[in-house]
Image (tube, rainbow, N blue to C red):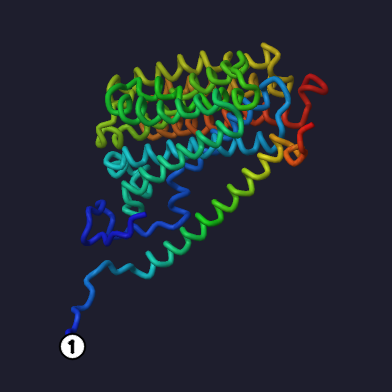
Amino acid sequence: MTHLPPRQGLRLTERQIKNRRMRNIAIGLCVTFLVVLFYVITIVKVGPGILRPEG
Amino acid sequence: MSLANPQTSEAGPLAAIGEYAAGPREYFALLKPRVMSLVVLTALAGMLAAPGKLHPVVGFASLLAIAVGAGASGALNMWWDADIDIQMARTRLRPVPAGVIAPNDALAFGLILSLLSVLTLAVVANFLAAGLLAFTIFFYLVIYTMWLKRSTPQNIVIGGAAGALPPIVGCAAASGHVTLDAFVLFAIIFVWTPPHFWALALVKCRDYERAGVPMMPNVKGPDHTRLEILVYTLILAPLGALPWLMGAAGAIYGAASVALALPLLGLAWKVYRVREGVEANKTAMRLFGFTILYLFALFGIIVFERGFGLFARWGL
């Protein structure tokens, strides 16, 4: 059985991990806000008639 | 986003402190929130001064897009200017020179927000407004930041056009075209910019000199700068009252524009006269502070008059 050497990859500090989590939450909130905003704008610009069949 | 270890990467001079560990607060600082607040106010004034009716949701979304566009150009400015920002006391703690945000991250952040804001404005308002916003970002980044800022003492005079455009963008977003009223609001901010920045530059001229930025006091000298401040203020004072004289703003605006012009002229005159010692710096900083109050007050009154319907109802 071969032993792999310990990984030499990037180690994040506690602060970097915490701030990455905060950034992810902020991005999630912004995307959610944009989805709601575009939905409301669509309703405002097109109006409720979007669901009404023509004729 | 960069997660690079500063000890093994191309870190900024202060990266060991910042560790490139930016949270949402640092990214928000990258948008220059104080400048953004002025952009929001002036764009809103342009929107409200535009003819026709605007749905509040469309108005809010347009304003948000303009604000984000302004913030994006601020982020791109900080990305490009990191090398000179670190040499000036006033700017050395900005996220990029402080090593909190990697330059490439600031660039990506600014580009993404620029694209998002322009496309949003195109969808929400119209292509004219979106095109004007794109031009504003381009002008601020390429014409001012990359070219004029490091090459001519007229940098903030010509570059001031970028900061003056938001009322025109707001007007275009609200009405689909650009009115003469919006151009007058543009002119007020354009003429306001030189005395505002040069008052600060008189005090911070050593900072600018160290960074190699050719501001007016470093190139033409403090005395010439004081004269130019006075000349621009003499133009600004009557120009500030023009929206009222043209009938685009009400009586409250008219009274305020005259009342505020007097101390503004007084301070500019004092800056011209007091040239030596601590008092000279104090007077320049007083003028710098008052110019901010002046612009916020004028545009705030337009928003107040138009926003609450005082102008339409009573001609106030």
Q: Which image quarter: residue B167?
A: top right
Query: Is B170 drawn above or below residue B114 in the view shown?
Result: above
Q: Chain of mark 1?
A: A
Residue placed most toward the observer, B182 or B246: B182
Query: Is B303 drawn above or below residue B95 in the view shown?
Result: above
Residue placed most toward the observer, B309 or B92: B309
The residue tagged with tag 1: helix, strand or loop?
A: loop
The picture places residue B280, in percent across and down from the top left corner, at 40, 30
The residue that disc 1 covers is A1
Question: Residue B195, can we see it?
Answer: no
| Apparent side of residue B79 relative to residue B265 in the rendered image (left or right) | left
Assess disc 1: are there few (<14), some (14-19) or many (≥20) residues with their C-alpha within 10 Å of its C-alpha. Answer: few
Question: Residue B84, can we see it?
Answer: yes
The picture places residue B59, in percent across and down from the top left corner, at 66, 34
- The three-letter amino acid code for the residue at tag 1 is Met
The picture places residue A54, in percent across and down from the top left corner, at 76, 33
Q: The N terminus of chain B is located in which quarter?
A: bottom left
Residue under the image location 37 percent in, 64 percent down: A16
Name the residue furthest top: B246
